[in-house]
Image (spheres, rainbow, N blue to C red):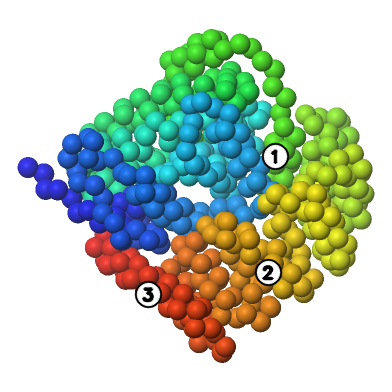
Amino acid sequence: MTPRPSKTLTTFAAALLLGQSVVVPGAAAGPLGDTSSFDLPDFGDSADAVLSPAQEKRLGHAFMRSVRSTEKVVTDSLLNDYVQSLGKKLITRSKSATGNFTFFLIDDPSVNAFAGPSGYIGIHTGLILTSESESELAAVLAHEIAHVTQKHLVRTFEAASRMSIPAAAVLLAAAALGAVAGGPAGVAAAIGGQAALMQEQLNFTRGNEQEADRVGMQILADSSFDPRAMPTFFERMGRATRAYATVLPEFLRTHPVTTSRIADAQGRAEKFPYRQVADDRRYYLARATLRVQQARTPDEAIQAFRSALNDHRYQDEPSERYGYALALMRGRQFDAARRELDRLRSEEPTRVEYVVTSARLHVRTNQVERGLAELEQASSRMPGSHPLRVELGETLLAAGKAERAAKVLEPLAKSQADNPQVMRLMAQAAGQAGRRAEGHQYMAEYYYLTGAVDSAVLQLEIGLKQPGVTFYHSSVMEARLAELKKEAEELKKEKKRL
């Protein structure tokens, strides 16, 4: 009889790190979060192996902290707001998708997307640039949403239940996040040559992919996107499969595209009525932003956008001009960038991307008060805009107005306690306003959310030593310090055991 594996959740959380974090010895013991306080369900009957919603939520938080500790998660509020709004559109308009989801970007030029526990869905920036329409991008997100709603991660956990925890960890990471370090062969080697088990898992994944295609296509149709975008994207990926031969992009490793799968998707798409879908301008603005960021030099970006505008080679002229303005800013041609932005704002004065970028340009040209005035005016018109509030808080800090920055950021810190960017800005605001203990408290949460538990512990210890710290704050920080020290100790034990 196969011995029943340990039920330590920190080990299972380690399984859901990115592929390279699992297959490299020692890396799997990266910061995982507050996961030591509850157990995995017993391995046994299929029904017993399903995580409860509370367990999956905690596991999702641990997963996200682990991702932040190993990957370059994008912090740009405009880009994040776009992918989150696109994902929200798919969720709220669909009868097929329910639950809470968090969409985030990873700064990586490869073509990839993945679903993690508790509705965390990661998108590589390379996927946005590879897509040729917003419906194609939405198709990939809908596919990943379907992986979550159909409980494919839980099913994978069940499939690995007869393995030892370390082997199950690698297998689960491969299924959930694509085994980006070395592909299936690398994973099989990492678990001691259990190639047969890996082959079984790959077959299981193909079944998941087919179901995710079906459900994802319905999500697309419900959300007024073009269902035909899914087989179109698959077909292009299929051509890439043949072109890449043995070296595949990440999306093709984790989402194998076959002729039968493309044909099946095309057949399903034909059952939906044909519709022409206009791409949201935010899609093109996000693509322009990423093109500027991924250009090797500012001059390369400037030349690319200038040539496209001169030759009329673009799908959306304002977005192309926006990219040109960003490229000029990157190249420190501030006067030319201002002309482009002013032209754009004359056509769409309330477009959030234009307002935020204009304010950033004012800050870079030592006109902080002008940038501040633009942001305050826009924020009063659109109080619910997350990018505007974040940018307003950051600009207030640049203007030396820490108390006002804290008042702007505190509501965000309460409503988005899992947002590292907000925690970092709040730490700056509190510190600059003279509330040093509070500043260290917020900084501890920033480090914790980015997976650096030891640094979080150090910040709390420093905060407790600050003069004038109130009894209430010292009590809160001492309790949090005890939690994090316990977690850090658990992580050290887990690292030694692995």
Q: Is residue 259 left or right of residue 161?
A: right
Which amino acid type is shown beneath numbered disc 1? Arg
Element under disc 1:
helix
- Residue drawn at (22%, 35%) of the image: 46
Instruction: Name the N-terminal-most of marks 1 and 3.
Output: 1
Q: Are marks 2 and 3 in contact (CB under 8 Å)?
A: no
Identify the mark at residue 287; answer none if there is no mark: 1
Of residues 487 and 18, the one drawn nearer to the viewer in this rendering: 487
Within-10-Å neighbours for mark 3: few <14, some 14–19, many 20+: few
The answer to whether any part of residue 496 appears in the image is yes
Tell me how far mark 1 sits from mark 3, CA to CA.
44 Å
Sequence order check, earlier mark of 2 and 3: 2
* Relative to 192, 78 lies left or right: right
Which one is nearer the viewer's eye here, 105 or 96?
Answer: 96
The quadrant in which the C terminus is found is bottom left
Question: Given the image, on which type of amino acid does mark 3 rest?
Answer: Ala
Residue at x 86% of width, y 31% of height: 311
Q: Which residue is mark 2?
A: 406
